[in-house]
DNA sequence: AGTGTGTTTATAAACAGGGGT
DNA sequence: GTACCCCTGTTTATAAACACA
């Protein structure tokens, strides 16, 4: 029934199409009613889970079909929270620290696993201070880089505190090459492009060669599967992998081919067209010219650069992401890919014409990427710790009974236009920041809809303006996790708490100092009124993005007391939540160490062109948390040491909010 | 060979594909070399011109196949300029003021008419003060609206000075309804949508009903042909047709269907998807919400609104553009189109599934649209005369022999972010404006590439930054007209000299007063250096957009002395060029009352989101004038009174530059 | 449950223009 | 010197996935 072979590949909430290379049918769709889009084909349901262990209240825990360290917990709506926690605890302890320690929580409401399940994958380091991944040689690290460990959590036990993260044991998520990029900064740029290309790439990926591609599980995606990242994401990965944070088009091609071998196998160059298209389309990518005017480099506009790198979004289930340039590729001259060969030589290379496979859905979830400012490169772009992405682990609010729904107040930190000049000083004294005004200068556009009252609720997807009339955004019940925050893991679609979240609450407005670098001045000519406040009225869930714990040191974000002025809830110090903790709000998670998925990291700034458009960049912090059901939740739970204390902490949060939800 | 039925429709430089409804072939293109896009199919050549009159030097004048008032002049490269002028004069006098008075100038170099000829259609009023089209009732005109007459020039004789332009005799380019929109402002908005819709539309198009659709020529496009406008253009037409300059989605649908019946005939709703896509994609379209929050209106961001209306781009050759809601349609409830009918009712309406036809190329050329600020509506958006689009008719510079090529200096006025508040005062004292600095505040982004010297020559299409190191842009020889300025008339693709051109030359920067409304402040965080200066280095031709003569009064732009600081040429007062005059530069037209085509009007602001992005809005003023050959030029020459004086004026310009060209 | 509206991504393609052969 | 081809870059069109009211 699918008519077009060119069906767009949607990274978000993929319906697991998995139909690859359908021949160009091009059937004339004479059956579709006029004015109505063709119905979305229903994907076949996922395979049943093999082994199910039934806990009290009907809670079932089954192994994930593809991820050995993950289990799926099917929770009936009638299940008791204590049973859920008990089951999770039991399972968490079952295999010890090396056993499966990730759980996908699924609501059993719809009679089992739904084929269009949207998983939220929360990966949160729960150890004492999380390990910090420093960028390569220690000398290259200019500031305190912040790294939230997103690995299978095997490194999160209290003993794994090595700061360089080099020997992670999961080969599929190997991040050894993380620190390699810091060396040889700005080396051989603009000269001997082919050679320097190989140098840089081999340098970047030399350690990756140790990864065994064949070592994967049975159902895992192969190397040649299409990566679950959008073109925009991959381009960012590529560019940010370079010390200079710039790349020529050819280098981008090559980087993507090297890291996502799927594209090597494409016989048609359409994907390159798409790369170019994305570069041009999205304003976040700008072109610079070498001093001699000979070479064009693509860069990421600093205001919009969230320093996304592949390592931050590396997904264990997808092997291709970690993969590696085969030695034969990374070291040989790349004439073939770069068009250095004559056209006749290239002509013979073409063979069977194969269409692009649709994007592979992430097998089940993805680990949330975090902005690791300059940990992988020695670029001048470096964020002081106070600017680093942080997620505040907030305690569950003392949910008063007043508002039946939509009472969890969570704020989204405005995207602080990322100052990538090293001249930007650290702001260890960030505690003086006021909260609301921080948003205001950042949102000159898409401004607070101060016009009419209601305003439409239709949102620019994932853009929510912290309207100044409601700087504190409200959660709505059962809207948090379903298909929302991390979506279905189909490729970097979520928001990331980038930089330190001012979590500006309405009130004093002194936070502009950090924000001055982004978009301090409201552009003339822009009229904030009347613009439909995206997400207004119907906005459901907001993450309280607060400074996360600084990985290797004390928290740099003491001034985070966001909602206090407008909320009755207590705000606990962050340290109390350094371990796994999240909470439900009503029937949904409400305040969470939720790392919004990197989606907005990738999308928010894409089309925005102006620094004043940082108002639009703020869209990047909107969470995809506006769903109504918490039927499907994927949560990585780390039983780092299996201490009951940690579980107890989690227990507090859960026990407080899960009852409403289940 | 064309593989995909979904071939995009390119409005610019259409190759006259005219292949409509090619069945979904989807042939596997096994013959295309790897890495190389399939070759563009060569369209069949245009039909031969029937009757040719040969003038000395081999100059041939033939009747245009489709436009009765147009003749095509094929000029061999060896032809003498005087012969060209003589031929044009003879032909111009041949039929008197009512005879054919438009000429398409074609270079005979390539052995005749090329099938991919790109015509530049210059329509320039040459009478004394050109008539002004006032917006409807005189009382509604708030400022001196500027209207460059783009009609068949029959109204440009010195006797046709009526200010309301109502009785234009060309039915195909009927603009009678221009003034009608001014009445009933803000009428019945948001209430009884269907009814008010009909009201507004019938009001808008009531006079258009007199247009005879069947009266066209033999080869003319029919009503159901696809309009030559992009979706973005049509949306702007639609929205700007409303007094409030806002429309709901349904209204946009209906407006487009009414004015472009082609879309009525579409059985598949893909075009609506495209409408929605364009609304979302382009930042120039924003959504507003009614005070009660019930209705969403789509608006055009004021900074980016150039007030384009269909009447400004009305093209005589395309009947669909002027056409008119049949009475049966505009007055009946529009349930069928607006989805008011039940789905089952709609279902029966679907019949044969027909694919969208590709965009019709403009039959030959198009009349350049001008921004007629608020002439069609009584909206508050109204440009004072000094802000109105203006083209300066500059004298041919005394071309010194110094630079063999690229010596014509023409500047592009930065797009002054369009102040649509009537509060903006006129600036009759605009002569004090300095030239360069005006550009600077407008181009905070895409800024002057002050990094390396050369910079890449690849441009963001039609965006040229007046790099501050070269505020005066240079023409390159034979680069002006071919496919450039007005392109091939495929749909609103060109730049328009919008607002008054500050033509900021490097030097004193006092022009910011007018610019203050647009984007006075450079956004923080934006780093202008290193951005590849689009069009730099290889930019070929720039139009010297200077204030055009005010239609019904003295010129309001006395301060136009753009290049003088940096050029050796004399700058004549504008009044000297009030009549037809244009000149060649080297082998190309150089300084010209050239109205860049409306393309940039439509495209420049589309994706830009920020007022600071006015720097990007400046792209809108980039001309598509970067071609290398002047092989094909379409020029409307108006022999308004057939006075030899007028021709003499033209003669001066021509004689000075045509020799190098031909 | 279905439709309409809105947001994004993917893909193909037209075309410009530089540079190489 | 020119024609042709490839590469890079810019836009537009179209389909589709998905959110959400
Ligand atoms: Mg770009
Ligand atoms: Mg928009």
Image (spheres, coloured by chain):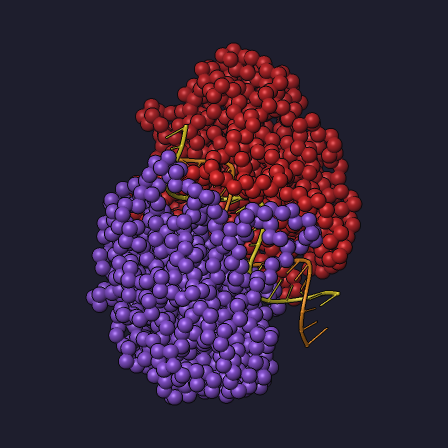
Chain colours: A red, B purple, C yellow, D orange
> In which quarter of the view is residue A320 placed?
top right
What residue lies at 47% left-to-right and 21% top-to-bottom? A110
Percent of width and height locating residue B79: 56, 84
Say above or below: B521 vs A59.
below
Say above or below: A194 vs B59.
above
What residue lies at 26% left-to-right and 58% top-to-bottom? B206
Labels in figure, total: 0
Q: Nearer the viewer, residue A107 or B634?
A: B634
Say above or below: B566 vs A426.
below
Q: Nearer the viewer, residue B555 or B35?
A: B35
Which image quadrant: the C terminus of chain B? Answer: bottom right
Percent of width and height locating residue B435: 44, 74
In this rendering, does residue A392 appear at all? no
Q: Nearer the viewer, residue A84 or A331?
A: A331
> In which quarter of the view is residue A363 placed?
top right
In this rendering, does residue A157 appear at all? yes
Q: Is residue B27 left or right of residue B8?
A: right
What residue lies at 63% left-to-right and 42% top-to-bottom? A356
Q: Is residue A573 left or right of residue A489?
A: left
Say above or below: A525 vs A466.
below
Q: Is residue C3 left or right of residue A553?
A: left
What residue lies at 56% left-to-right and 46% top-to-bottom? B24
Percent of width and height locating residue B525: 49, 55
Percent of width and height locating residue A6: 57, 43
Q: Residue furthest top?
A: A56
């Amino acid at each position: 029934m699918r008519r077009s072979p060119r069906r767009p590949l949607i990274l978000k909430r993929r319906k697991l199409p998995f139909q690859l290379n359908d021949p160009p049918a091009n059937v004339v769709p004479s059956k579709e009613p006029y004015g109505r889009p063709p119905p979305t084909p229903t994907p076949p349901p996922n395979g049943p889970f093999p082994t199910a262990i039934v806990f009290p209240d009907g809670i079932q825990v089954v192994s994930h079909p593809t991820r050995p360290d993950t289990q799926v917990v099917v929770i009936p709506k009638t299940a008791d929270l204590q049973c859920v926690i008990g089951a999770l605890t039991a399972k968490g302890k079952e295999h010890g620290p090396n056993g499966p320690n990730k759980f996908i929580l699924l609501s059993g409401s719809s009679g089992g696993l739904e084929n269009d399940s949207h998983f939220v994958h929360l990966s949160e380091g729960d150890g004492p201070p999380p390990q910090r991944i420093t960028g390569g040689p220690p000398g290259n690290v200019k500031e305190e880089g912040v790294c939230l460990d997103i690995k299978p959590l095997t490194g999160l036990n209290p003993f794994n505190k090595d700061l360089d993260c080099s020997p992670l044991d999961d080969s599929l998520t190997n991040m050894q090459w993380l620190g390699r990029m810091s060396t040889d900064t700005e080396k051989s740029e603009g000269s001997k492009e082919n050679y320097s290309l190989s140098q840089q790439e081999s340098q970047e990926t030399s350690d990756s060669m140790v990864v065994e591609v064949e070592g994967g599980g049975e159902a895992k995606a192969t190397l040649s599967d299409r990566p679950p990242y959008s073109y925009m994401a991959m381009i960012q990965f590529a560019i940010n992998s370079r010390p200079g944070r710039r790349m020529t088009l050819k280098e981008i091609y090559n980087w993507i081919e090297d890291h996502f071998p799927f594209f090597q196998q494409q016989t048609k160059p359409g994907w390159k067209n798409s790369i170019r298209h994305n570069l041009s389309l999205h304003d976040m990518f700008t072109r610079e010219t070498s001093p001699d005017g000979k070479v064009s480099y693509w860069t990421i506009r600093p205001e919009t650069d969230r320093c996304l790198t592949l390592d931050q979004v590396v997904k264990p289930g997808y092997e291709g992401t970690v993969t590696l340039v085969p030695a034969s590729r990374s070291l040989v001259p790349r004439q073939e890919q770069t068009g250095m060969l004559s056209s006749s030589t290239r002509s013979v290379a073409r063979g069977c014409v194969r269409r692009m496979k649709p994007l592979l859905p992430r097998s089940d979830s993805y680990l949330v990427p975090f902005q690791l400012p300059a940990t992988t490169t020695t670029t001048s772009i470096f964020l002081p710790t106070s600017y680093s992405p942080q997620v505040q682990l907030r305690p569950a609010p003392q949910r008063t009974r007043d508002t039946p729904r939509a009472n969890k107040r969570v704020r989204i930190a405005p995207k602080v236009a990322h100052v990538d000049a090293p001249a930007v000083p650290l702001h260890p004294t960030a505690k003086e920041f006021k909260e609301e005004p921080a948003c205001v200068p950042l949102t000159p556009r898409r401004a607070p809809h101060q016009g009419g009252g209601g305003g439409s609720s239709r949102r620019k997807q994932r853009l929510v303006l912290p309207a100044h009339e409601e700087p504190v955004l409200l959660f709505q019940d059962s809207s948090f996790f379903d298909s929302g925050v991390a979506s279905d893991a189909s490729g970097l679609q979520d928001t990331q708490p980038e930089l330190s979240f001012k979590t500006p609450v309405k009130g004093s407005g002194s936070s502009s100092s950090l924000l001055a670098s982004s978009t301090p001045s409201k552009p003339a000519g822009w009229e904030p009124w009347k613009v439909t406040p995206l997400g207004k009225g119907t906005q459901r869930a907001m993450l309280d993005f607060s400074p996360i714990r600084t990985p290797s040191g004390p928290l740099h974000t003491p001034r985070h007391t966001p909602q206090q002025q407008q909320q009755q809830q207590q705000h606990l110090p962050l340290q109390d939540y350094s371990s796994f903790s999240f909470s439900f709000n009503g029937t949904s998670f409400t305040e969470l160490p939720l790392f919004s998925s990197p989606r907005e990291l990738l999308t928010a700034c894409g089309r925005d062109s102006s620094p004043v458009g940082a108002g639009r960049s703020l869209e990047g912090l909107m969470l995809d948390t506006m769903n109504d059901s918490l039927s499907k939740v994927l949560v990585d739970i780390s039983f780092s040491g299996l201490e009951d204390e940690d579980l107890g902490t989690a227990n507090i949060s859960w026990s407080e909010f899960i009852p409403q939800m289940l």
